[in-house]
Image: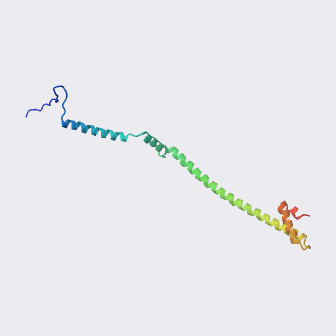
Amino acid sequence: MPPRTPSPVPVDLEGKVKLGIQTLGAILVSVVVGMVTLFGIWSTVATKSDLQSLLSDHSLRSDGHPEAANAMRVVQRQLAATEARTQRLEEKQDDTRQSVEYIRARIDFLTEQTVREVASQRNVFHPQSRQAGDRAVQRLRASGDPAEAIGP
């Protein structure tokens, strides 16, 4: 068999290259494959919004900034402890306020009873001794001074 020699490029008489159907089909297939590849590559390129979301996700994630995340955890623990302490203090303050209100009400009640008894005992021989005690309690409520309410 004789050795193969490359065939010359088919050229017409005017110097233009003549292409056959198979060559044109191969060029068309390579252009389509090239376009598909180009569109595939273009679709994987990150857009501006993709980059912004990537950066914001990185900024918000704790593993992106471990020192800041650790500092935030420490602050959150301190805040939780402070809130718990504040809650306990508020409960204790409320209990104290209720105790003080009860003690004041009890002192007022006992003071009124004492004024009533003393005023009634001073007027023991009058038939209206109970009314004298009630008037003394009214004077006590108006003035707030037991000695003034009982009178001389």
* Residue 149 rendering spot, x and y as whole percentages: 87, 63
**Residue sitting at the far top:** 14
95 versus 5 height, above or below: below
* Residue 77 rendering spot, x and y as whole percentages: 56, 51
* Residue visible at 87% across and 70% down in the picture: 131
Depth check: give the residue in front, 53 or 20. 20
**Residue sitting at the far left:** 1
* Residue 25 rendering spot, x and y as whole percentages: 22, 38
Depth check: give the residue in front, 15 or 36. 15
* Residue visible at 61% across and 53% down in the picture: 83
* Residue 97 rendering spot, x and y as whole percentages: 71, 59
* Residue visible at 86% across and 66% down in the picture: 136
Q: Quadrant of the C terminus?
A: bottom right
Q: Is residue 28 left or right of residue 128?
A: left
Q: Is residue 114 left or right of residue 91?
A: right
Determine which quarter of the picture holds residue 53: top left
